[in-house]
Amino acid sequence: MSTLEQLYAAADKRRAENQLPYAGAVSPAEAFELLQLDPRVRLVDVRTRAELDWVGRPVIGDGQYAHVEWTRYPGAVPNQEFLQQLNQVATPDTPVLFLCRSAARSKLAAIAATQAGFNKAYDLLEGFEGDKDGQGHRKTVSGWCFRGLPWIGA
């Protein structure tokens, strides 16, 4: 197991290497370790309610998981209340790990949070389901589920 300092240093290294406009990026395994080591860390799932209902969600410590949609279902309409809802589950100095299906919306959420004053906004690389394989299926090549981290299905 890594230390908090090592985990945040790895995230910051990715930030610098990739010129990310937020605090950094963490792998699924690093995110899980951060959640175990620091009870202040929040995993904010930005997928739609439908995705949670139909696909599943991570299982982590009490109070560390929050769901704040980036877009609404149906129609992929932007959630105009995203920042207001984020402020209900975290403060600007809370380490926040943003998670989506494949790490696209989570990057946008990390950018928006950073612009709103959250100085510890991180993208969770690979997402919950990860990239598609050759047959178009997810959960087979990358992501929280593929990495064997705890989750509950729909």
Image: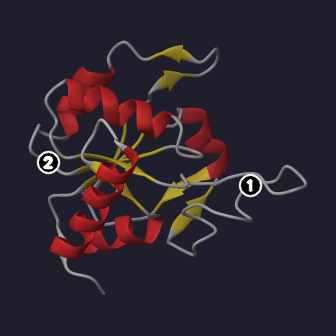
| Amino acid tagged 1 | Arg
Above or below, 37 relative to 63: below
Location of residue 73 in the rendering, given as x and y in whole percent from the top left corner: 59, 22
Of residue 148 and residue 141, the one placed in the foreground of this image is 141
Q: Residues within 10 Å of mark 2 (few under 14, many from 20)?
A: some
- Residue furthest right in the image: 135
Residue at the disc numbered 1:
138
Per the image, label 1 sits on a secondary structure element best described as: loop
Total count of labels: 2
Tell me how far mark 2 sits from mark 1, CA to CA.
30 Å
Q: Residue at x 18, y 24 (%)?
A: 116
Q: Determine which residue is flagged by label 2.
A: 94
Q: Quadrant for residue 64, please give it.
A: bottom left
Residue at the image position 59 percent from the left and 46 percent from the top? 102
Q: Is residue 18 left or right of residue 76?
A: left
The answer, for residue 46, to whether it is visible in the render is no
